[in-house]
Amino acid sequence: QVQLVQSGAELREPGASVKVSCKASGYTLDIFGTSWVRQAPGQGLEWMGWISDYNYKTTYSQKFQGRVTMTADTSTNTAYLELRSLTFDDTAVYYCARDLSHSWEFRHLDYWGQGSLITVAS
Amino acid sequence: SYELTQPPSVSVSPGQTARITCSGDVLPKKYAYWYQQKSGQAPVLVIYEDTKRPSGIPERFSGSSSGTVATLTISGAQVEDEADYYCYSTDSSANHRVFGGGTKLTVL
C-alpha cells in the first residue's frame, strides 16, 4: 500500500537551513511526483512547489523561489525539501504529498505524509 | 499570483445541507479539488475533478462547478463532518498550484 513517511520535528535558529525527508513506499518516484505543502499554526494550507516524475523537474511557488530546493533520491525512493534562510514565519508543519500531475496535465494530491513540524526560534 | 477565495466559515445544523464555495478566475478551465482536514491530521481528498468522489467518501459529499465558482455540497451534514475544507487548483499555466484560504465547517 502507498505510504509516505516523513522525518521528525526539527528546531532551527533564524537564518539556518532545514532539510525534510519523505520516504515513499508502494510506488516509485519516477512514476509519480511529489508536492510539498506547509501549514503555519492556526493557518491554512500553502503549496510550496513540486518535483515531477521521471525527469524530476522542479516548479516552485514564487514566494519560496531562491531559498527552496526539492530533490528526489531514486536509490532510496525518498523526496527531500530544503528551506534556507529561515525566519520565525517559517514555523509550520510541512507535508509531502504524492502528486498525480504530469508535465502536461494538472491533477491532485492523493496520499499525504504525516507532516513534519519545523520550529524556528532563537 | 493566482488566488482562490473561500468563505472563512459555514455553520449548519445536523441533517442540513452545507455548501462551501470557491471562486477563481481560471476555474472555468481548470479542475477544482476539495480536501477535508480535521484538527491535527493531514488533509483528505473528498472531491476530485470538480464532481468526482473518491472511494470511501460518503455519498453525502458532492461537487459542482459553474463558471468561476466551484461548490462543495454536504447533503445531510453530520457532526463528524466538522472540519476545515480547502479547495485546490492551478493557474492557467498549470504549473503553479494554490489552495483556497479554507472554510471552517461547524455542524451543531
Image (cartoon, coloured by chain):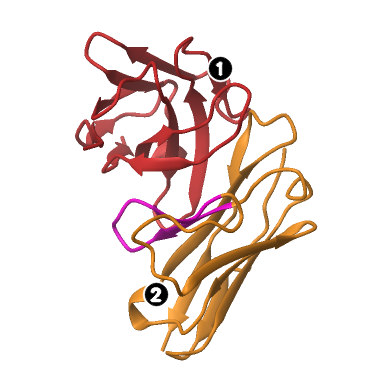
Chain colours: A red, B orange
Question: Quick check: A79 above or below A109?
Answer: above
Q: Position of residue B83 (x, y in %)?
A: 40, 69
Residue at the spot x=47%, y=55% of the render? Answer: A43
- Location of residue A97 by image quarter: top left
The residue pinned by badge 2 equals B82
The residue pinned by badge 1 equals A66
* Relative depth, front residue between A30 and B106: A30
- Location of residue A91 by image quarter: top left
The kind of residue tagged 2 is Glu
Please state if A7 lies on the left or on the right of B83 as rendered. Answer: left
The question of residue B52 being in magenta is answered with: no
Q: Position of residue B25 (x, y in %)?
A: 79, 49
Please state if A36 lies on the left or on the right of B64 as rendered. Answer: left
Dot 1 falls on a residue whose secondary structure is loop
Q: Which residues are magenta?
A: B33-48
The residue mark sitting in front, 2 or 1, is 2
